[in-house]
Image (spheres, rainbow, N blue to C red):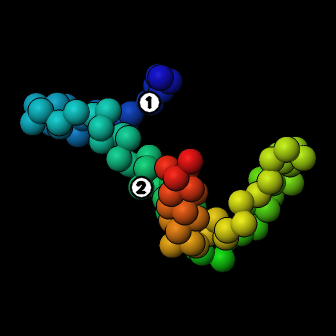
Amino acid sequence: MKLVNVRLSDEDAARVADLRREGVELSEVVREALRARHLALRPPLQTRDVRPMLDAIYDRHPLDEKSERPPVDATDRRAVNRFIRAKLARRRRR
């Protein structure tokens, strides 16, 4: 885990002291602030964003001849669910 030092103004140091007296964990406050700011910088993924991302991953890490992409759209959770259930059912019948 990375440790980060932060310089505080006198006003911020006083706020920190108040929070500590109240029993607030400063590390959790910092983590929450970082997560909130990061989410604000990066908008959530949309469905249309997934296919180009998967294609880029497959381009960087191509499958060998032994492996094949499953004949299912990986962005369709219901289709993936049906595919997995059918594959498990075939294994059980053996």
Considering depth in this image, is 23 or 1 the residue closer to the camera? 1
Q: Is residue 51 visible?
A: yes
Residue 72 rendering spot, x and y as whole percentages: 67, 68
Residue 42 rendering spot, x and y as whole percentages: 57, 61
Label pair 2/1, CB-CB below 8 angstroms: no
Residue lying at 38% horizontally and 48% vertically, measured from the top left: 33
- Would you call the spot at circle 1 few (<14 residues within 10 Å), some (14-19), or many (20 or more)? few
Q: Residue furthest front?
A: 94
Dot 1 corresponds to which residue?
7
Image disc number at residue 81: none
Question: In which image quadrant can residue 71 be found?
Answer: bottom right
Left/right placement of residue 61 relative to residue 30 reads: right
Residue 2 rendering spot, x and y as whole percentages: 50, 24
Q: Which residue lies furthest to the bottom in this view?
A: 48
- Would you call the spot at circle 2 few (<14 residues within 10 Å), some (14-19), or many (20 or more)? few
Q: Which type of secondary structure does the marked residue at label 1 adopt? A: loop
Q: Which type of secondary structure does the marked residue at label 2 adopt? A: helix
Examine the rendered structure and indicate whether residue 13 appears above or below residue 48. above
Please state which of the two labelled residues, at mark 2 or mark 1, is closer to the viewer: 2
Left/right placement of residue 64 relative to residue 21 reads: right
Labels 2 and 1: the sequence-earlier one:
1
Residue lying at 51% horizontally and 57% vertically, measured from the top left: 89
Left/right placement of residue 32 relative to residue 20 reads: right
Image disc number at residue 36: 2
Amino acid tagged 2: Ala
Question: In which image quadrant can residue 18 be found?
Answer: top left
